[in-house]
Image (cartoon, rainbow, N blue to C red):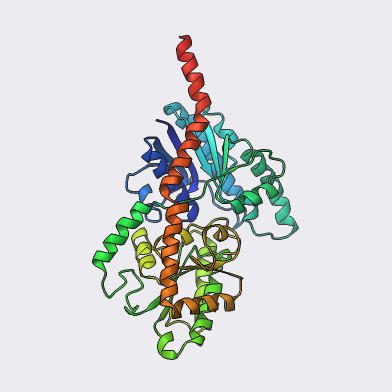
């Protein structure tokens, strides 16, 4: 058994959080002891595994500021994670025996974790270089980011093992961190398909006229539903879905357009200014496009509501450009839904064009054409759904994810186990 602590900045409900929770579930299933250390955890805004007692979750440093004068978000995030790493290395590691730290998103804590008693191994999972996630705002911003960018590259290179979430991210990693010699291993995110299967059976038994999701009470049973799941951030490009949907409505007879619905279900946090602002921006766009009767904007649906939405939807839209991986297309495909996504980034590795969905250029007309095709052709939609489900089972299964991650953990522990065995023999 290996004692593993996951360090994650904010245990909310995003794709990065889903990855670390699934990684923890995978390692726990192999008999390892797993817990979380984080800067923030809201039991009402998280994945249920982090609030129902499945894992021990300890919060440290939440009193530190998230921003200074409305700015310096990255600096504050780095300081908060450094504080968590200090606690892990100087307090937690002295209270109990620790074997592995699993870090992601922010690498600045890696060298601090090396201060820990008995020197636990450190695995760093790179969803995407942090320096590429910030919006460029001219010379002053570049000067501010320069030391942080150097620190990111330096600290990523200090991890014992580095992982990335896709071949696309692997290429970006190499182009960004040119001073690093090692080549990270690709560990694709996966789905805990047992949960999906159980929920799907549960929903099928309780299926009724209503959706059963707060905010969807007035959706008719014969509605044709396009679903867009992603956080309320501008880079997620929800506006593309709205403009394409408007074109679809215009292309259909009135009798048919009335049954079409677009549901945008986005992660939303009142503490994040962009979430609040962008949600309002999308509301205004809905009004401008005269789609009030056909579009619903839902905020932070819980796990059960998300399953219902995926189950009831006819097609999934995925609009971010150059998304590093994107777990949502896998969720849609496993639920046998065709996926329409941009022909860039991680979706090019998960979606097979014209087989499990469509990969389109970033133009509303291209998206609308694909949406119209799936709306009109039931057989095509069903066939793509079947192929998508098979693809997730064959290439992105939770079992394969668990096997690979467990092998990585055992491999990184081998030197320590060999040293420990030699010491026992000497005594």
Q: Is residue 270 rendered to the left or right of residue 193?
A: right
Q: Nearer the viewer, residue 89 or 310?
A: 310
Rendering coords of residue 140 (x, y %): 73, 56
Q: Is residue 126 rendered to the left or right of residue 14?
A: right
Q: Nearer the viewer, residue 366 or 122?
A: 366
Q: Nearer the viewer, residue 82 or 408?
A: 408
Quadrant location, the N terminus: top left
Give the vertical position of 380 relative to 417 (above or below).
Answer: below
Rendering coords of residue 282 (x, y %): 52, 73
Given the current orientation, which residue lies at the most extreme left position? Answer: 205
**Would you say residue 296 is visible in this rendering?**
no
User: In the picture, residue 312 is in which quadrant?
Assistant: bottom left
Residue at image location 51% in from the left, 49% down from the top = 188
Given the current orientation, which residue lies at the most extreme top position? Answer: 427
Q: Nearer the viewer, residue 344 or 144?
A: 344
Q: Is residue 192 rendered to the left or right of residue 130?
A: left
Give the vertical position of 317 relative to 31 (above or below).
Answer: below
Tell me how many marks there are. 0
Give the vertical position of 421 relative to 30 (above or below).
Answer: above
Rendering coords of residue 153 (x, y %): 66, 43
**Would you say residue 360 is visible in this rendering?**
yes
Give the vertical position of 1 relative to 307 (above or below).
Answer: above
Residue at image location 73% in from the left, 60% down from the top = 138
User: In the picture, residue 35 is in which quadrant?
Assistant: top left
Rendering coords of residue 343 (x, y %): 59, 65
Quadrant location, the C terminus: top left
């Amino acid at each position: 058994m290996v004692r593993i602590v996951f360090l994650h900045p904010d245990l909310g409900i995003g794709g990065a959080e889903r990855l670390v929770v699934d990684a923890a579930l995978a390692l726990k299933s192999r008999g390892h002891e797993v817990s979380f250390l984080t800067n923030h955890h809201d039991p009402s805004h998280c994945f249920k595994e982090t609030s129902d007692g499945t894992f021990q979750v300890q919060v440290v440093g939440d009193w530190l500021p998230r921003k200074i004068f409305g700015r310096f978000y990255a600096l504050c995030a780095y300081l908060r994670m450094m504080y968590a790493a200090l606690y892990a290395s100087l307090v937690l590691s002295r209270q109990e025996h620790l074997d592995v730290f699993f870090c992601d998103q922010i690498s600045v804590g890696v060298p601090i974790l090396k201060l820990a008693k008995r020197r636990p191994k450190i695995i760093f999972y790179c969803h995407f270089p942090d320096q590429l996630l910030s919006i460029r705002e001219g010379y002053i911003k570049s000067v501010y980011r320069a030391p942080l960018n150097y620190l990111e590259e330096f600290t990523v290179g200090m991890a014992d093992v580095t992982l990335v979430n896709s071949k696309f991210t692997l290429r970006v990693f190499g182009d960004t961190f040119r001073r690093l010699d090692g080549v990270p291993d690709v560990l694709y995110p996966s789905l805990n398909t047992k949960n999906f299967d159980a929920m799907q059976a549960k929903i099928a038994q309780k299926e009724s006229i209503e959706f059963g999701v707060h905010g969807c009470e007035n959706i008719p049973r014969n509605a044709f539903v396009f679903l867009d799941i992603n956080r309320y951030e501008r880079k997620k490009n929800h506006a593309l879905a709205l403009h394409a949907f408007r074109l679809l409505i215009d292309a259909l007879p009135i009798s048919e357009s009335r049954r079409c619905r677009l549901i945008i279900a986005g992660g939303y946090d009142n503490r994040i200014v962009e979430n609040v602002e962008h949600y309002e921006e999308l509301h205004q766009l809905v009004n401008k496009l005269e789609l009030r009767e056909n579009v619903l904007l839902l905020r932070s649906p819980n796990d059960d509501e998300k399953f219902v939405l995926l189950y009831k939807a006819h097609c999934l839209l995925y609009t971010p450009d150059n998304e590093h991986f994107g777990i949502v297309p896998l969720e849609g495909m496993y639920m046998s839904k065709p996926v329409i996504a941009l022909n860039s980034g991680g979706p090019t590795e998960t979606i097979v064009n014209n087989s499990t969905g469509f990969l389109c250029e970033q133009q509303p007309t291209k998206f609308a054409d694909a949406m119209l095709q799936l709306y009109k052709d039931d057989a095509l939609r069903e066939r793509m759904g079947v192929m998508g489900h098979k693809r997730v089972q064959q290439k992105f299964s939770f079992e394969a994810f668990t096997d690979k991650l467990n092998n990585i953990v055992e491999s990184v522990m081998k030197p320590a186990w060999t040293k420990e065995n030699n010491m026992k023999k000497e005594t």
